[in-house]
Amino acid sequence: MRITTTPARRRRRAGYGAAAALLGLLAAAATPAHAATDGSVDRVPDGPLAGNSAPAGTAGAAREAAQDATRSATHAGTGVPVGISRLAQGTGRQVAITIDDGPDPRWTPQVLETLRKHHVKATFCMIGTKAQKYPELVRAVAADGHQLCDHSVDHDVTMDHKPVAYQRQQILDGKAMIEKAVPGVPVTYYRAPGGAFTPDSRAIAAASGMRPLGWSVDPKDWSRPGLKAILSTVEGKLPQQPTVLFHDGGGDRSETVAALKEYLPWLTEQGYSFSFPARTTP
């Protein structure tokens, strides 16, 4: 016996299919492809962002999910992934050293000297106003072959709760301040202050050719926990192709310099080589 499908039944089935597709989209958007082991995660502002209205109901949730899925892809114009990079380049025992919150006239030269002594190239995440104040240090970092990273205009750790226009200004003006110190040298990464990324800030960075940059090992050297505590963290069980966070600005960095002097040769003894953070791969 042939079963006749009525128009009403077809409409109900179509509705079920649409609902299932929507739930699948929402689940995919809510599940990160790489679980964050650091503080660098997407954070949603407290209220609607400038120029946007708050989404309503299921349609609004679907629209947000679709937008986030788009932002998670590679930016079509630059070829730079929008996702947060936490791995060193390479496929084996590589490690990426990253240095934040400078440049600083006292500590940046000491960090550079230590890196030079151990033949290590690192990525320096610079605050725009400091790059503007100490352009000669930006040039010294670039001259030694290190990579440059935009760390925003003035390290506002609350910028993830502010309008998109403000986030864009902090990101793009910070990049411009660094570039002005070293014309022609690319700024290839963006690290959000405190790791407080948003989907919009990641998209803005990628659209301007900068890979959003996180980390996978954080010794919290900025808090001055002591040399032993720093070394215990960075020499502990390291994840695959780690990106390690250090600081050359924001206060007394004597413990950081001391830790680097011991850590860099230790990594070499363990069979690690040094590279930059992954930039063009997921």
Image: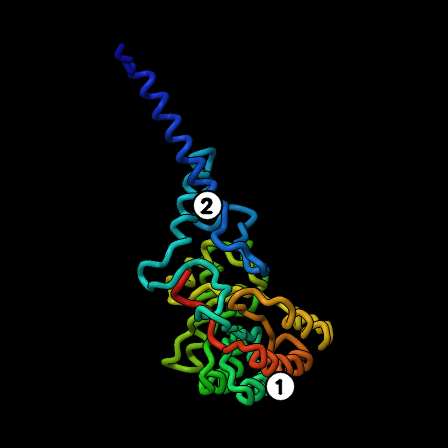
Q: Which residue is mark 1?
A: 106
Residue at horizontal 67%, vertical 75%? Answer: 231
- Give the amino acid type for the residue marked by disc 2 in the picture: Ala
Instruction: Say left or right for 170 vs 105.
Output: left
Nearer to us in this view, 115 or 162: 115
Nearer to us in this view, 44 or 46: 44
Q: Which label sits on residue 89? A: none
- The residues tagged by marks 2 and 1 sit, at their Cα atoms, a distance apart of 44 Å
Tally the marks.
2
Looking at the picture, the colour scheme in use is rainbow
Does the residue at mark 2 contact the one at mark 1 (Cβ under 8 Å)? no
Residue at horizontal 38%, vertical 81%? Answer: 183
Q: Position of residue 208 (x, y in %)?
A: 38, 65
Within 10 Å of disc 1 (Cα), the crowding (few <14, some 14-19, many 20+) is some
Please say if 46 is above or below 222: above
Instruction: Say left or right for 52 vs 36.
Output: left
Please say if 203 is above or below 48: below
- Give the amino acid type for the residue marked by disc 1 in the picture: Arg
Residue 173 visible here: no
Question: Secondary structure beneath disc 2?
Answer: helix
Question: Secondary structure beneath disc 1?
Answer: loop
Instruction: Say left or right for 50 vs 237.
Output: left
Q: Which residue is mark 2?
A: 29
Q: Which of the two labelled residues, at mark 2 and mark 1, occupies the earlier sequence position? A: 2
Q: Residue furthest top?
A: 1
What is the quadrant of the C terminus in the image? bottom left
Residue at horizontal 44%, vertical 43%? Answer: 65
The mark closer to the camera, 2 or 1, is 2
Please say if 10 is above or below 265: above
Residue 5 visible here: yes
Within 10 Å of disc 2 (Cα), the crowding (few <14, some 14-19, many 20+) is some
Q: Position of residue 196 (x, y in %)?
A: 55, 59
